[in-house]
Image: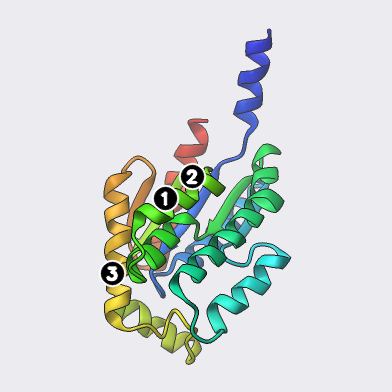
Amino acid sequence: MRESRLVTARSRRGLFVTFEGIEGSGKSTQLRILARRLRRLGVPLLVTRQPGGTPAGARLRRLLLHAGRIDPRAELLLMFADRRQHLTESIEPALAAGTLVLCDRYTDASRAYQGAGRGLGEDLVDLLHARFCGLEPDRTYLFDCPPATGLARVAAARGGKDRIEREALAFHRRVRAAYLARARKEPGRFLVLDGTRPVEELAERVAGDLDTLRAAR
């Protein structure tokens, strides 16, 4: 009987789904499209982002994206401060309640941006993740596109760029390469999608994959 109750409790836990990609890859657009679909279906849902998914995180986001120069190691630690608060305040309680969590960026972003882009190394990011986070996504959708394409989209959409978007093209190429390398390392978790494909086509692929994932629970 006790084992049966434990199995039931585990089955009620929500799915943790993350959206990753370089600047202008289309990940945030796809997250919004999926969220609208799931809400229409009545699926219990938390839509959030990193950095910035909590009140404290919102202040950290402004600092990280719009302050002057930040030491790379300080940047990484600020990202994990945001991430830890986000997990304890928002993500973990939602998952425990059976809510499906859609998160715009998670630790893979730090592996790519601080680990590769800033040259701090993936091992350091993995160490911090293991010590302060530990939670792994059930699925990660990685939207891949050439950095020049993504940055052109950002410029066309907003005009101005934040501190990360203003980095040199070589920085964004390192970020892209790190994302793809991580996806090759964890093929069971990642679904890599061509971010240059039509929005509707990508939305259908994401929705279909998530339906399959949810049905298998």
Residue 55, percent from left and from top = 73, 66
Q: Tell me where residue 100 sits by quadrant.
A: top right
For the residues labelled 1 and 2, say whether their Cβ atoms are less than 8 Å apart: yes
Give the secondary structure at mark 3.
Answer: helix
* Cα separation between marks 2 and 3: 23 Å
Q: How is the image coloured?
A: rainbow
Which amino acid type corresponds to the residue marked 1 in the rendered image?
A: Asp
User: Closer to the camera, 119 or 29?
Assistant: 119
Mark 2 or 3, nearer chain start: 2
Q: Which x, y percent locates residue 98? A: 67, 38
> Pointer 1: residues within 10 angstroms few (<14), some, or many (20+)?
some
> Who's the residue at 52% across and 87% down the image?
68
- Quadrant in which the N terminus is drawn: top right
Within 10 Å of the Cα at label 3, are there few (<14), some (14-19), or many (20+) other Cα atoms? some
In the picture provided, is 163 more to the left or to the right than 85?
left
Q: Secondary structure at mark 2?
A: helix
Query: Which label is found at residue 6?
Result: none
- From where the camera sits, is residue 2 visible? yes
What's the amino acid at mark 2?
A: Ala
Q: Neighbour class for label 2 at 10 Å: few (<14), some, many (≥20)? A: few
**Residue 197 visible in the shown view:** no
Residue behind mark 1: 126
Kind of residue at disc 3: Arg
Q: Position of residue 164 (x, y in %)?
A: 44, 79
Residue at image location 51% in from the left, 49% down from the top: 17
Say if 201 sits above or below 184 in the image.
Answer: below
Q: How much space separates mark 3 and mark 1, taking CA atoms?
A: 18 Å
**Label 2 belongs to which residue?**
130
Taking the spot 36% from the left edge, 50% from the top edge, the residue there is: 191
Depth check, mark 2 against mark 3: the one in front is: 2
